[in-house]
Amino acid sequence: GDSVTQTEGLVTVTEGLPVKLNCTYQTTYLTIAFFWYVQYLNEAPQVLLKSSTDNKRTEHQGFHATLHKSSSSFHLQKSSAQLSDSALYYCALTSSGSWQLIFGSGTQLTVMP
Amino acid sequence: GGIITQTPKFLIGQEGQKLTLKCQQNFNHDTMYWYRQDSGKGLRLIYYSITENDLQKGDLSEGYDASREKKSSFSLTVTSAQKNEMAVFLCASSIHRAAETLYFGSGTRLTVL
């Protein structure tokens, strides 16, 4: 089946510094779409980025991610973290195997002043 | 825009009790989902429904029933609540299948005494 791995459960970064949240995946099927969802405290998860094109950079709200099928990765990056970026981030994928959205375990990002 | 409304926001039950969670969406989306959110485990799919009266089991369906009697509503029943269980249940919808963006409700937080 499909799986998504987010190796860091907790990431802490100082405001103004770059941040990178890792996401790798495994699937034996055709991949359809990749997502990053963000969940702020006491709010619903919401989509941050979506991509289905290999080696194409996708950007939104200062965050960017590039799907690299050669390394099975879809890491999320931001050049300058803001206090308001503190949230829970989920990487997810859909493949033709299940047509379900499979989520990683999530990374809690804390931005410190 | 639309909204997903989950009721109740907080649900306290007793061990062995049958508990029902409700979800309403006004996006006019075809597909609806129930996910369980546990810290460190990500979002795991319990049930989904691609149209009215359709039900599909996710990886975590054991111990749960679901019902989609109308396009706009999707309910989840915990058939026998487990003692000391604590989790957040998230309802979501998408236009069609999971290759599209999912829109989430704010969740129902379950506590079993």
Image: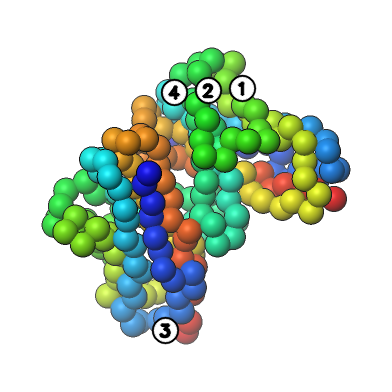
Amino acid type, callout 1: Ser
Q: Pointer 4 and pointer 3: residues touching (CB < 8 Å)? A: no
Q: Is residue A23 above or below residue B33?
A: below
- Quarter of the rendering occupied by the N terminus of chain B: top left
Q: Amino acid under label 3?
A: Thr
Could you tell me how far apart the alpha carbons at marks 4 and 2 are, in whole angstroms? Answer: 7 Å
Image coords of residue B65 (percent x, y): 65, 28
Can you tell which mark lies on residue B55? 2
Mark 3 — residue?
A14
In the image: residue B96, left or right of residue A44? left
Chain of the residue displaying label 1: B
- The image shows residue B91 at horizontal and vertical percentages of 55, 38
Q: Chain of mark 2?
A: B
> Do callouts 2 and 1 mark residues in contact (Cβ within 8 Å)?
yes
Which label's residue is closer to the chain start, 1 or 4?
A: 4
| Same subunit: marks 2 and 3 | no
